Amino acid sequence: MQIHPTSLEFENLPSVYALLDSIIFMWFIVLVTVAIISWVAAKIWHIHSIPKHLAKEKGLAQAKLIFWMCILGLVWKPLWVLAVLAIVTDWDKVQAWFKGAQS
């Protein structure tokens, strides 16, 4: 194979080519990729379930709402943010504020 119009010729393949051409190495790459993707998905799931676990621990009445907001927050992030805000909000004070505003 001639690279340029010179007398230089390239006859040998790079030394790493045999490794890249092996089926065992390609399966190794596939398994490592799947493992990394699975690990990242598990961590994302864990982070998204934190508000759900906190709501259950605190015994909040809106725990099911927070659960669904966390699940749907995997698709649309503002719902997850609202679930976190629902955890840290003092609902008794909010209710008292609404009652004071109505009178």
Image: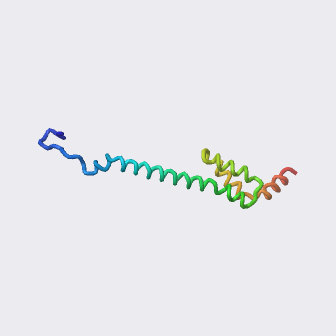
Q: Is residue 79 left or right of residue 102?
A: left
Q: What's the residue at 11%, 42% (across, down)?
A: 7
- Which of the pair 76/16 is nearer the observer? 16
Counting from the top left corner in percent of width and height, residue 51 is at 66, 56
Q: Residue furthest left?
A: 7
Horizontal side of 97 relative to 4 (left or right) equals: right
* Furthest residue toward bottom: 57
Quadrant where the N terminus sits is top left
Colour scheme employed for the rendering of this structure: rainbow
**How far from the left and from the top, in percent, is residue 37?**
49, 50
Q: Is residue 62 left or right of residue 41?
A: right
Residue 9, percent across and down?
15, 43
Q: From the viewer's perspective, tell me whether residue 101 is left or right of residue 48.
A: right
The residue positioned 88% from the left and 51% from the top of the image is 103
The total number of labels drawn is 0
Can you name the residue that lies furthest to the right here? Answer: 103
Quarter where residue 92 is shown: bottom right
Residue at 35% across, 46% down: 23
Residue 94 in percent (x, y) is at 78, 55
The residue lying at 76 percent from left, 57 percent from top is 60
User: Which one is nearer the viewer's eye here, 93 or 80?
Assistant: 80
